[in-house]
Amino acid sequence: MSMPDPNKKYTFKDYLTWQGEERWEIIEGTPYLMTAPSWQHQAVLGSLLNQFYNFLTGGSCQVFTSPFDLRLPYQEEKDEDISNVFQPDLVVICDKSKLKGTGYVGIPTLVIEVSSPSTGKIDKILKFNAYEKAGVSEYWIVEPTDKTVSVFTLQEDKGYGRPQTYSEDDTVSVNSFPELEIDLKKVFQDI
């Protein structure tokens, strides 16, 4: 496939026609090529997945990792017209009726992005703004290099406000699941 034109706006319908080994995201219609994750990224993601999976097994919610097409529609946007298609590192879905094809159409319960120097701007600005605008109630940015986690929770004014920030020595109580605590020592122990 030839590279999408960065000056053109795309939708999920276009995204479905892209072939090749590359993985893409579309944010506000603009395509972004995803890079291969580092081993540190994968180690952190594996530990988070393990802790969430063990807690959610047998319940009404389910955890997924990339590749997984999270489509965030604005208002009454039809699936093929959606201009936000994300590949979140980890996403928790509690409304399984919106699972469709290669992912999910709607607002997930929780999204986690494992950030790196190459994805920092996208995770901290573009995705942050899109997730906040869509109404994702809980968004985590995990930084393996610093061994920190920033947890953003949607406030009454529909904004994320100031994050709760944790280090490798902390345990995070998950806002969406108050009985779940994520042990960050386990998350960062192998990096």
Image (cartoon, helix red, strand yellow):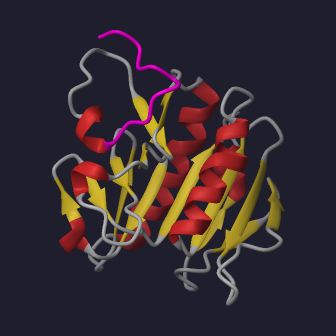
Q: Nearer the viewer, residue 151 or 56?
A: 151
Seen in the image, is 154 located left or right of residue 74? right
Residue 163 rendering spot, x and y as whole percentages: 80, 68
Seen in the image, is 17 located left or right of residue 182? left
Q: Quadrant of residue 146?
A: top right
Residue at position x 19%, y 73% in the image: 97
Query: Where's the C terminus, which quadrant?
Result: top right
Q: Which span is picked out in magenta?
A: 1-11
Residue 22 rendering spot, x and y as whole percentages: 37, 19
Q: Dominant secondary structure of the magenta stretch?
A: loop
Q: Nearer the viewer, residue 124 or 178?
A: 124
- 158, above or below 118, in the image: below
Residue at position x 18%, y 57% in the image: 100
- 62, above or below 188, in the image: below
Query: As drawn, which residue projects farthest toward the front?
Result: 8
- 68, above or below 77, in the image: above
Residue at position x 38%, y 72% in the image: 75
Query: As drawn, which residue projects farthest toward the bottom?
Result: 156
Q: Nearer the viewer, residue 95 or 15?
A: 15
Query: As drawn, which residue projects farthest toward the top?
Result: 2
Seen in the image, is 13 located left or right of residue 169? left
Magenta span includes 2: yes
Residue at position x 65%, y 78% in the image: 154
* Count of labels in the image: 0
Query: Where's the N terminus, which quadrant?
Result: top left
Magenta span includes 5: yes
Residue 176 rendering spot, x and y as whole percentages: 54, 80
